Amino acid sequence: MHKHSCMLAAAMYAAIGIAVAAPESSLPAPIKALETQGVEIVGRFDAPGGMQGYAGLLLQKPIGIYLTPDGKQAIVGTMLDAKGGNLTDAPLKKLVSKPMTEKNWSKLGQSSWIADGNKDAQRIVYTLTDPNCPYCNKFWNDARPWIKTGKVQIRHIMVGIIKESSAGKAAALLSAKDPQAALQQHEQQHASGGIQPMAKIPADIRVKLDGNKKLMQELGFFATPTIFYKDSNGIMQTVQGAPSAKALNVILGTR
């Protein structure tokens, strides 16, 4: 892009309230210091009290950062107004949570998963599933009432991390003629071991399993099940472990 065009685009973004990621060289010293501590600076926004706000990302979690007017200190946290209203939430949703949701939701969709439920379901939920994971099996069983309504489809992103046989079982499920039926049978017979693991995993299936494991690590999770869903604002949320009865109503919605 031409230099003049770049400057014009930046001016237009600023005019309509979209933060532009600041070049590293122009970041104030306290903000640079946070970067060295692992904070990814996503963008900036105007804040009350003469402060400059920065939207950051730390361990996949959005954080608000406020630079004092003299530019010498940075405060990490939530800014409240006189009535206790949260002034940090809106900019973080706009600058971090929504773009991150779009990016990560797309990655989840492109992974190697097995569908459980109606293909035309209104609500989609992703979960990282190890075939040997008892808590994954509990979630599968607990979700049956929602699956039966046809309103929810759970997409099981298969990984093999718990036991030596996990990868072979995950490969067998992904290789099955009807993966959805194979997954159902496996979960129903989970207590007795479920599906037989493949002794030798085909190269194409190995690529899929490696891709799923890499995605899991990129998202910052190391245990199953890890469940991904969108809240009422369209923001991706995560739950680790078998959800409680109350959490199921949030994750899967009304039946």
Image: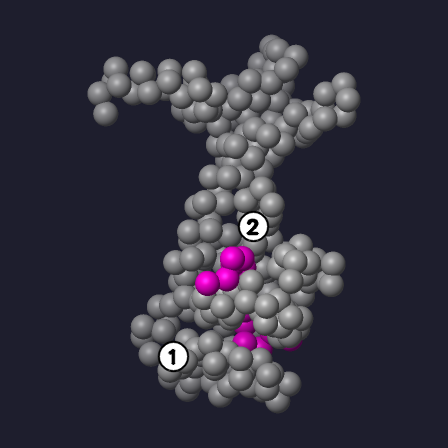
Residue found farthest to the left: 2
Query: Residue drawn at (60%, 18%), measured in percent from left and top?
Result: 47
Of 146 and 84, which appears nearest the observer? 146
Q: Is residue 138 above or below residue 246?
A: below
Examine the image and state in which quarter residue 113 appears: bottom left
Query: Residue drawn at (77%, 22%), measured in percent from left and top?
Result: 83
Q: Earlier in the sequence, mark 1 or mark 2?
A: 1
Residue denoted by label 2: 230
Q: Is residue 50 above or below residue 169?
A: above
Left/right placement of residue 69 relative to residue 16 reads right
Of 153 and 156, which appears nearest the observer? 153
Q: Is residue 132 magenta?
A: yes
Instruction: Bin the neighbour count of mark 2 within 10 Å (Cα to Cα): few under 14, some 14-19, many 20 and up.
Output: some
Secondary structure beneath dot 2 equals strand
Left/right placement of residue 116 relative to residue 245 reads left
Secondary structure beneath dot 1 equals helix
Q: Which residues are magenta?
A: 120-136
Residue denoted by label 1: 175
Examine the image and state in which quarter residue 221 appears: bottom right
Of 216 and 37, which appears nearest the observer? 216
Pointer 1 and pointer 2: residues touching (CB < 8 Å)?
no
CA gap between label 1 and label 2 equals 29 Å
Q: Is residue 246 above or below residue 17?
A: below
Left/right placement of residue 247 relative to residue 16 reads right
The amino acid type, in three-letter code, at marker 1 is Ser
> Which quadrant of the figure contains the C terminus?
bottom right
